[in-house]
Image: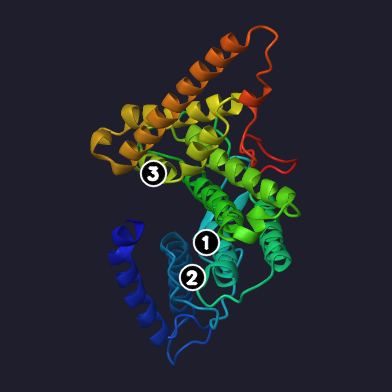
């Protein structure tokens, strides 16, 4: 479904990139008679296309149009015209396009090393090392990015802080990449079934769940009817399957109830801020996930109480509270995603 929704965008982007390549937008060399300003604008367009291209590649599982043959350098940290520089509440500035290109280059590695059809077949230990290396690279990138914070200024719905918007996009992309990298581990049956790799699998599960929760937490900074907030709400709603699975795997835990509240928050925000929520596919999917998860928790509670009463005060009901082999309820390791 995601592929069909983005098919038009893929076709248009592909045509635009081909024209850019033919026009030499990707190279720093100027054409005869071309000014520095004109060349810089061309390169900025190409960098933006590079970011969009790798966004779509991971979303739809298609190879990026701009392949590894192109050497993609970074935009200047402080461009002469100041375009792309966002002032943050703490008084610092951030070149958003530069950071987006950094992330896109990591996405390029993720796709080529893990998801490309022609990716080399590797042993379990080599795949785990690739996942760990990509995770370390993502963590190093994240360490340079300011946290999303709530401004003390009350914003009007039509006048949203651009710094907050761009920071949210960067954090959202980071969390999604964490999930993309670590969920690859479940495509390898030998990794999942191996007792030797159990701790590594558990760590990846923990990071996926933590990143999914952090993605939803971004909505805390966008509880309004601004178009970007509605867009973010729809985007987050397509990423709640991990939370849903976590609830079903850990029905007897406190974290399952907390995760159910996260799903309920999404439903409430849709109803409060999106006047067309009833027609939204993402809302309907989120609602179904919430209803099924709620019912699962209710059934588990009833079954547990029934078993306890049947066993009596001295009965052993430990087995009723044991989760699945892969515990999804951990909130995160010492390093928050």
Q: State left or right for residue 161 relative to residue 268.
A: right
Q: Residue at 30% of width from left, 71% of height from top?
A: 12
Q: Which residue is mark 1?
A: 97
Q: Is residue 151 above or below residue 209?
A: above
Residue at mark 3: 228
CB atoms of marks 1 and 2 within 8 Å: yes
Can you give x and y, in whole percent of width and height, for residue 56 in the image?
42, 63
| Image position, residue 116 (x, y; %) | 52, 72
Mark 3 nearby-residue class (10 Å; few <14, some 14–19, many ≥20) = few
| Residue 11 point in image, percent of width and height | 30, 71
How far is mark 2 from mark 3, CA to CA? 22 Å
Alpha-carbon neighbours of circle 2 within 10 Å: few (<14), some, or many (≥20)? Answer: many
Residue 79: tell me if it is visible. Answer: no
Q: Quadrant of residue 63?
A: bottom left
Q: Residue 172, labelled with which disc?
A: none
| Left or right for 269, reference 198 | left
Question: As rendered, which of 20 and 240 lies closer to the eye?
Answer: 240
Q: Are marks 2 and 3 in contact (CB under 8 Å)?
A: no
Task: Looking at the image, tell me whether mark 3 or mark 1 is earlier in sequence order.
Answer: 1
Residue 75 occupies which quadrant of the picture?
bottom right
Secondary structure under tag 3 reads helix
Cα gap from disc 3 to disc 1, whole angstroms? 18 Å
The mark found on residue 47 in the picture is: 2
């Amino acid at each position: 479904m995601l592929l069909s929704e983005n098919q038009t965008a893929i076709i248009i982007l592909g045509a635009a990139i081909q024209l850019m390549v033919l026009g030499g937008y990707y190279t720093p060399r100027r054409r005869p008679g071309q000014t520095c300003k004109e060349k810089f604008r061309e390169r900025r367009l190409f960098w933006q296309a590079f970011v969009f291209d790798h966004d779509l590649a991971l979303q739809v599982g298609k190879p990026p149009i701009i392949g590894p043959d192109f050497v993609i350098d970074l935009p200047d940290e402080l461009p002469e015209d100041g375009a792309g520089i966002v002032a943050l509440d703490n008084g610092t500035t951030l070149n958003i396009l530069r950071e987006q290109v950094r992330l896109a280059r990591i996405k390029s590695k993720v796709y080529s090393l893990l998801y490309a059809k022609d990716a080399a077949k590797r042993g379990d230990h080599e795949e785990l090392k690739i996942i760990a290396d990509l995770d370390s690279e993502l963590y190093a990138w994240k360490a340079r990015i300011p946290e999303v914070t709530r401004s003390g200024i009350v914003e009007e719905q039509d006048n949203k802080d651009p710094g907050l918007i761009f920071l949210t996009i960067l954090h959202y992309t980071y969390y999604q990449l964490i999930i993309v990298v670590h969920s690859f581990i479940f495509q390898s049956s030998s990794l999942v079934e191996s007792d030797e790799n159990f701790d590594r699998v558990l760590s990846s599960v923990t990071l996926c769940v933590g990143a999914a929760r952090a993605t939803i937490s971004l909505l805390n900074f966008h509880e309004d009817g601004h178009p970007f907030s509605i867009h973010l709400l729809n985007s987050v709603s397509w990423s709640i399957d991990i939370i849903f699975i976590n609830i079903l795997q850990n029905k007897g835990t406190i974290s399952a109830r907390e995760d159910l509240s996260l799903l309920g928050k999404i439903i409430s925000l849709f109803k409060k801020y999106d006047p067309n929520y009833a027609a939204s596919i993402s809302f309907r999917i989120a609602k179904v996930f919430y209803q099924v998860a709620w019912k699962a928790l209710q059934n588990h509670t009833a079954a547990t109480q029934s078993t306890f009463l049947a066993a009596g005060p001295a009965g052993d009901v430990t087995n009723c509270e044991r989760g699945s082999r892969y515990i999804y309820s951990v909130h995160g390791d010492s390093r928050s995603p």
